[in-house]
Image (tube, helix red, strand yellow):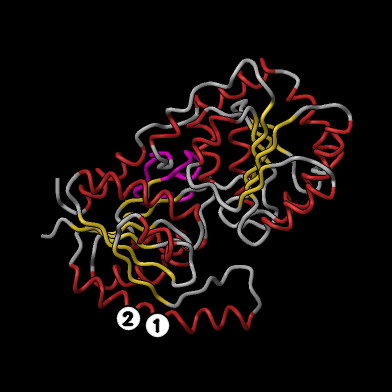
Amino acid sequence: MSRRVVIAGGGTGGHIFPGLAVARELKARDVEIHWLGARRGLEAELVPERGIAITLMDLEGMHARSPAAAAHALALLPAAVWTAIRTLTKLEPMAVLGVGGYASTAGLAAAGMLGVPIVLQEQNSIPGWTNKFLAPFADLICCGFEDAVGAFPSMPGEWTGNPVRADFFDVPDVRTDGPFRLLILGGSQGSLFLNRMLPRALKSLIDDGAQIEIRHQAGVRWAEVVRTAYQDFKLEANVTAFLAQPWQDLEAADLVVARSGALTISELAAAGRGALLVPFAAAAGTHQEFNARSLENAGGAVVLTEREATPERVAAVLGKLLCDRDTLRSMGEKARRVALPGAAGKIAERILAVGGAV
């Protein structure tokens, strides 16, 4: 049997980066990695940059789309499954790891047809549609949140935590002096809601005398628009489309404003940074709000829904937090307590066990 694992999935960074973290652990155990992903997903760029071979397929998501768009996405699936079958037949992997997202469907369907062992990695507190559909074919489901284990009552599920880079766990505690630094995270694609709301909220704060250094990750589509918005409000802000080394940005930050995708929550916890979280209201099954509440319940975050997150309300919350370093340090410490170090290595070991290599 080959010491080879295929990772299936992607679309967004929240699915790709956990897979890359597990891939690093598998490589350290002398396992060869191959990726199956979508041609239009971020994996087409991010995976080859890490020196991992990838097979790209024409796939599109079906969730929350018009009937015509969903039908088109469904029509693409047979050809993608056939591509995945040919790839798996050639590679003969010991197992396939599904990291979620529409990009995982073809690879996992092919693995099920060929009898290749399947491990699913469910990042969210409420499982996504793809993983719920494919769970009956899995040999093991590794859950990022403890709550998610109960969503698979008849399946072998385990709370492993979400895999994040070890660099996040090395981030020191929040500083006790210096200028207040705010980091805004919109996720790998950026958040239109945060991009529109935060310049207005921060103008109100700064007009009232607050001194804040702003670092805003806006997404490729919105970076220039957001940069212009800050300029129009006569605010200084470091606006970027993407964070290449986000642990460094978290180290510099005293507080974070972010959406609440599973990877964001896990990275905040690992880095020990408190946050104001605004869940994406249209997320499937409202999973982002459940993710956010888990960190809020631990004392590591304040949560505002999109309806609650007016510029005035956000300015009030930020103003209160940014003038209280003791609270910021306490939030960071409480966030760090919910982190699970070693998740990537644990998942790698489970894959090897399922694949019969240990």
Is label 2 in a helix, a strand or a loop?
Answer: helix
The residue to which callout 2 is attached is: 82
Residue 257 drawn at (x, y percent): 67, 39
Residue furthest to the left: 1
| Residue 346 sits in quarter | top left
- Asked whether, in this view, residue 66 is left or right of residue 311, the answer is left
Can you say which quadrant of the picture contains the C terminus? top left
**Which residue is located at x 51 percent, y 53 percent?**
127
Residue closer to the observer: 184 or 234 = 234
Q: Are marks 2 and 1 in contact (CB under 8 Å)?
A: yes
Q: Could you tell me which residue is drawn at 14 percent across and 50 percent down?
A: 357
Nearer-the-camera pick, 61 or 209: 209
Asked if residue 83 is among those painted magenta in the image, a careful observer would answer: no
Q: CA distance from mark 2 to mark 1?
A: 6 Å
Residue 104 occupies quadrant:
bottom left
- Tell me the crowding category of disc 2: few under 14, some 14 to 19, or many 20 or more residues within 10 angstroms, Cα based: some
Q: Nearer the viewer, residue 326 or 112?
A: 326
**Is disc 1 placed on a helix, strand or loop?**
helix
The correct choice, above or below, for 56 with respect to 329 in the image is below
Q: Give the amino acid type for the residue marked by disc 1 in the picture.
A: Pro
Residue shown at the point (48%, 84%) measured from the top left: 75
- On residue 90, which mark appears? none
User: Residue 144 in the image: x percent, y percent?
Assistant: 45, 43
**Is residue 351 toward the left or the right of residue 14 in the image?**
left
Disc 2 residue type (three-letter) = Trp
| Residue pointed to by mark 1 | 78
Which region is colored magenta?
A: 143-161
Number of other residues with Cα within 10 Å of mark 1, as a class: few under 14, some 14 to 19, many 20 or more = few
Kindly identify the residue that appears in the image at 23 percent across and 48 percent down. Answer: 27
Report x, y in % for residue 129. 52, 62
In this picture, residue 244 sits left or right of residue 107? right
At which x and y percent is residue 138?
A: 33, 58
